[in-house]
Amino acid sequence: MSDGTKNAQRPNLNLGVGELNTRNIDAIRTAISRKKREVLSALLTGEHPADIADIFEQLSSDDRLSMIDLAAYILSPAVLAELEDEVVEDVLPLLELKQISEAVAELDSDDATQLIEELDKDQRAEVMANLSTRDREVVEASLAFDEETAGRLMQREFVAAPEFWNAGQTIDHMRSLSEKGGESLPDLFFDLYIIDSRFHPLGYVPLSRLVQCGRDTALKKVMLNIPALIDPKMDQEDVAYLFEKYDLISAPVVDEDGRLTGMITVDDMVEVIQEENKEDMLALAGVSEAGLTDTAFSTVKARAPWLLVNLITALGASFIISLFKDEITKLVALAVLMPIVASLGGNTGIQALTVAIRALVTRDLTPANTWRVV
């Protein structure tokens, strides 16, 4: 999970990320063991939410529980949005429903949805009841889409303007929304979408281009063509491919009638690309991801089936070799060559599989060139 919260914290330029986290984790563990709430708060004050989330993930389950008892407020909405899903799933039952509700209300709709979906049925019902009517409708609309689709990823906060506006009117409009509390502005956005009277997207204007225009410049004169419109039912992997293909920073999401309903930003796509690449690598090895919260039993349970399949195929190969034991006895050189053949065959298969899967992901391997590749 991630959000677009802007932070002004200055990074420590003298330490690497790993060294900085190691130093903080040791001090935090000491503060937790001694129940020093003030020390704990001082250590984490000013840190980026992503760094706090990273530190929190490195703690043991007991230390996490103690940290929440001492200072639950440290897990701000921005920090909750940065935590890994399996960690969020363990943490949410330990937090007060009021804190969760406030986090959902503060986050952008895409991050709020990811937080809500980690709650159990009873918690979800109570949190949804505490939300405003608008926030509840937004979350329910997002949850109506299948997991790993654009509908789950998109945020419904975006900025749009009619084609007959000029740059000055648009900037004044956005400034007025911000002065009212930013109720209609997303925390982070890169493009302004130009729409017609039916709310169909006609083009977009990057913010960098907008601020360089004169106030009287018509939006339709500076808008660019939208390279891709996203269907909310589109698989997230296909969305990531479009972002990579067209070098997108954000992309509009439209409903069945072609009306603008939301947008997807590149920060979410970076996570999707990382997740998909990780899934492909784990699939190559025939294993599932071992999360920080997984037990030894659950890890063995996930990997044992593939190890069993490997054992069966190895026994089959051994049986076939045993059929030729007389020939091997007569020509000992055959026994010497067997491990070489097995090693080269396995490595060759892994190489071919890796290249093929990568080609499928990048769309280089298609039905049109399958036979040539084979």
Image (cartoon, rainbow, N blue to C red):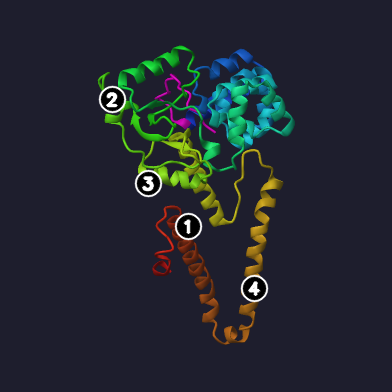
Label 4 vs 3, first from the N-terminus: 3
State the CA–CA distance, disc 1 to disc 3: 18 Å
Q: Is residue 3 magenta?
A: yes
Give the amino acid type for the residue marked by disc 3 in the picture.
Lys
State the CA–CA distance, disc 1 to disc 2: 47 Å
Give the amino acid type for the residue marked by disc 2 in the picture.
Ala
**Looking at the rendered structure, which numbered label has been put on residue 357?**
1
Label 3 vs 2, first from the N-terminus: 2
**Magenta span covers which residues?**
1-17
Q: Nearer the observer, disc 3 or disc 2?
A: 2
Q: Which residue is mark 2?
A: 218
**What residue is drawn where x is 29% and y is 27%?**
209
264 horizontally vs 113: left or right? left
Query: In x, y percent, where is residue 2?
Result: 52, 31
Q: Nearer the observer, disc 2 or disc 4?
A: 2
* Quadrant occupied by the N terminus: top right
Give the amino acid type for the residue marked by disc 4 in the picture.
Gly
**What residue is drawn where x is 39% and y is 57%?**
364
